[in-house]
Amino acid sequence: MTAQDPRPAPNHGFGIDVGGSGVKGGIVDLDTGKLVGERFKLATPQPATPDAVAETIAAVVAHFDWTGPLGVTYPGVVTEGIVRTAANVDDAWLGTNVAEVISKALGGQSVTVLNDADAAGLAEERFGAGRNNSGVVVLLTFGTGIGSAVIHNGLLLPNTEFGHIEVDGKEAEHRAASSIKERKDWSYERWTKEVTKVLVAVENAIWPDLIIVGGGISRKADKWVPLLGNRTPVVAAALQNTAGIVGAAMAAHGDGTG
Ligand code: BGC
């Protein structure tokens, strides 16, 4: 912390990562990217409507007695606080001012909402697999869908949606999400052929210096990253299940989002 830093010590933030099965949160040390204490998780309510999810977020926040600003991830495009896409979540989210709904459930606390992959990308670039790299870093998350983040010299370009670009006549996430590997019961060899096609399409369009692969399947990265045939160096995400929380907390403080 410098003499000019306006934030009081300790430099803590709070992040919430909203996923299909769990709403996870924690207090984040914004200087180290580490959680201060535990990561707390509650089951995602079903149906996962905005109001029900907001109530669950409020319960996670209450668990920590957190009263400051918080960041929350959403698995789709959010511009000007409004949800624009809902590829793998309930359509009820479309058009919702999501920060407002959550803030209301929290009695007016300040809430910043950003895309889930953008949050993970911010955290990985600053504290994880991209920490010693400058230039353009692309993070791709492989799960139910494919999420993407682009970070240039520490600053996020929000709402890239590389999971929805068309690759060889098919949407990237319908070709190479890890859910497709599971559904088709593909081997790593078979699935990696599809992942390579997606990575080549991304690198031909944006020429990153480094690609970070995240999502649950990145825990087995040694089984498939060596099989990839694209040209940009690829590394596995390092923060695993805290990246979304850390990135959300960073965004709530304007770290990496300008
Ligand atoms: C959504 C992205 C999201 C990704 C991972 C995609 O279907 O369009 O916004 O980041 O899934 O959740």
Image (tube, grey):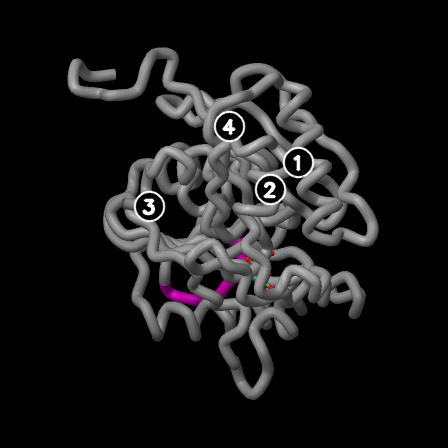
Circle 2 Cα neighbour tier, 10 Å, few/some/many (<14 / 14–19 / ≥20): many
Identify the amino acid type marked 1: Ile
Identify the amino acid type marked 4: Phe
Q: Quadrant of the N terminus?
A: top left
Q: Position of residue 177 (x, y in %)?
A: 64, 64
Relative horizontal placement of residue 41, taking residue 94 as reference (left or right): right
Q: Badge 4 is on which residue?
A: 14
> Would you place residue 183 above or below residue 125 in this image?
below
Query: Alpha-carbon distance for marks 3 and 2?
Result: 20 Å
Which residue corresponds to the image point at 61% horizontal and 17% vertical from the top-left? 65
Query: Does the closest atom of ligand 1 sit within 8 Å of the Cβ of label 2?
Result: no
- Write the start and end of the magenta stretch as one range: 225-231
Can residue 42 be seen by looking at this rendering?
Answer: yes
Q: Badge 3 is on which residue?
A: 257
Q: Badge 1 is on which residue?
A: 57
Which residue corresponds to the image point at 62% horizontal and 18% vertical from the top-left? 64
Residue 63, located in which quarter of the rendered image?
A: top right
Query: Alpha-carbon distance for marks 1 and 4?
Result: 12 Å
Relative horizontal placement of residue 13, taking residue 182 as reference (left or right): left
Q: Position of residue 86 (x, y in %)?
A: 63, 65
The residue mark sitting in front, 1 or 3, is: 1
* Nearer-the-camera pick, 253 or 95: 95
Circle 4 Cα neighbour tier, 10 Å, few/some/many (<14 / 14–19 / ≥20): many
Label whose residue precedes the other's in the sequence (3 or 4): 4
- List the single residue furthest toward the left: 4
Dot 1: element: helix
Query: Alpha-carbon distance for marks 2 and 1?
Result: 8 Å
Label whose residue precedes the other's in the sequence (1 or 3): 1
